Amino acid sequence: MSQALRRLPWNGPEGKPAMVPDGNPDGPLSRLADYIEAQQVAAAEAVVGLARGMLDSGEEFSTGELTYVARRLVECLTDVLRVARSRGERLPCNPLPLDGPLTGSLSEHVGEALRGGRIGR
């Protein structure tokens, strides 16, 4: 029987996902991964807050400023998606696919929620 692997919140040297056996959630590497995931989520919250403040300010920003903010948002989103995948893969029962588009009724429910204003700011 093969042991489950945990996706770490960083890539390996070749740019591929870094993995570790998930048999020791209290081990030093798992605790380091938990700490880094928490830092990545906190950083994403801060960057989203700053970006939202810029957008809500009504000020005009240069292309360079907007490009800088967009790059930081993409970096944070990439990190948070990696955290979400890692945590989702470790759920005992995972009814939703972790990759690919939403399908079927779930996609319809999300669309209805967006149109009805239940998802957003």
Image: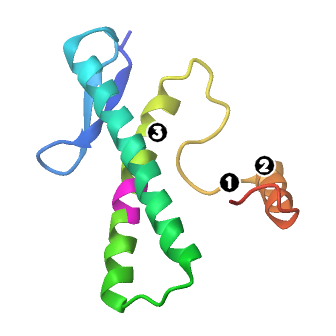
Q: Earlier in the sequence, mark 3 or mark 2?
A: 3
- x and y percentages locating residue 21 in the rendered image: 28, 18
Residue denoted by label 2: 106
- The quarter of the picture where residue 23 lies is top left
Decide: few, some or many residues near mark 1? Use Cα within 10 Å; few <14, some 14-19, many ≥20.
few
Determine the main secondary structure of the stretch shown in magenta. helix
Q: Quadrant of the C terminus?
A: bottom right
Number of numbered discs visible in the structure rendering:
3
| In contact (CB < 8 Å): disc 2 and disc 1 | yes
Report the front residue among 115 and 90: 115
Residue 76, numbered circle: none
Residue at numbered disc 1? 102
Magenta residues (range): 73-77
Q: Is residue 91 left or right of residue 118?
A: left
Residue at 47 percent across and 30 percent down: it is 87
Left or right of 112 in this view: 30:
left
Under circle 3, the secondary element is helix
Q: CA distance from mark 3 to mark 2?
A: 18 Å
Q: Residue at x 40, y 64 (%)?
A: 73
* Residue type at tag 1: Leu
Pointer 3 residue: 85
Q: Nearer the viewer, residue 59 or 26?
A: 59
The residue type indicated by label 3 comes to: Arg
Which of the two labelled residues, at mark 1 and mark 3, occupies the earlier sequence position?
A: 3
